[in-house]
Amino acid sequence: MKNKMKEMEEEADKLRKIQEQVEEEMQEGTEENGSEADARSVYVGNVDYSSTPEELQELFAPCGTVNRITILCDKFKNPKGYAYVEFAEVEAVEAAVALTDTDFKGRQIKVTAKRTNVPGMGKGRGRGRGRGRGPPAFRGGKGYRGYGGYGGYGGGPPP
């Protein structure tokens, strides 16, 4: 019985080590692949809501080999009006950017090189909470008036 427990613990340790190695490799791979894919991708703005990936593929085919087209949708599955196109080669991005202001389904599309999303960028320091309280430790607006009620005459709920 003790031998079986020992064997099971050893096997569990081996599995944990293998799992850690796989997770490390996966994390390294996604970071590198993500920035590589971003370098080969373009943002396409002002895309018609009825557009399909096939139509966009047709539009960008002369630029180079298209790997993937992503048309972003909101939570109700309605298109947001922009898309990302990933190419096989980095050189295709320049040709695609040249398609800016091209008429596509009655709209002038905007094509720019995709920016790499850096976690933590753009957060800044925030805007605080609410609009502020005015002068500290003074509530009631026009001093104590005796009567509660609304309308800025004191005694009502705090603003």
Image (cartoon, rainbow, N blue to C red):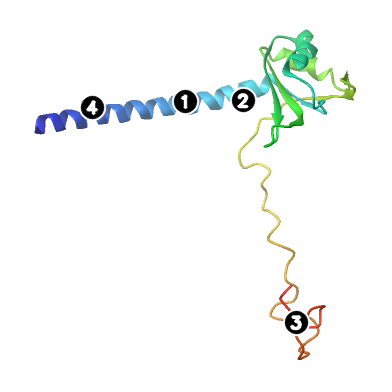
Say which label, 2 or 4, has the lower sequence index: 4
Label 2 vs label 4, nearer the camera: 4
Residue type at tag 3 = Gly
Residue lying at the far bottom in this picture: please name it: 146
The residues bearing labels 3 and 1 have C-alpha atoms spaced at a distance of: 59 Å
The residues bearing labels 3 and 2 have C-alpha atoms spaced at a distance of: 56 Å
Q: Are marks 3 and 2 in contact (CB under 8 Å)?
A: no
Q: Is residue 154 above or below residue 125?
A: below
Residue type at tag 4 = Glu
Within 10 Å of the Cα at label 4, are there few (<14), some (14-19), or many (20+) other Cα atoms? few
Residue position for label 1: 26
Q: Are marks 3 and 1 in contact (CB under 8 Å)?
A: no
| Number of the label disc, if any, that sits on residue 35 | 2
Q: Are marks 3 and 4 in contact (CB under 8 Å)?
A: no
Q: Secondary structure at mark 2?
A: helix
Residue position for label 4: 11
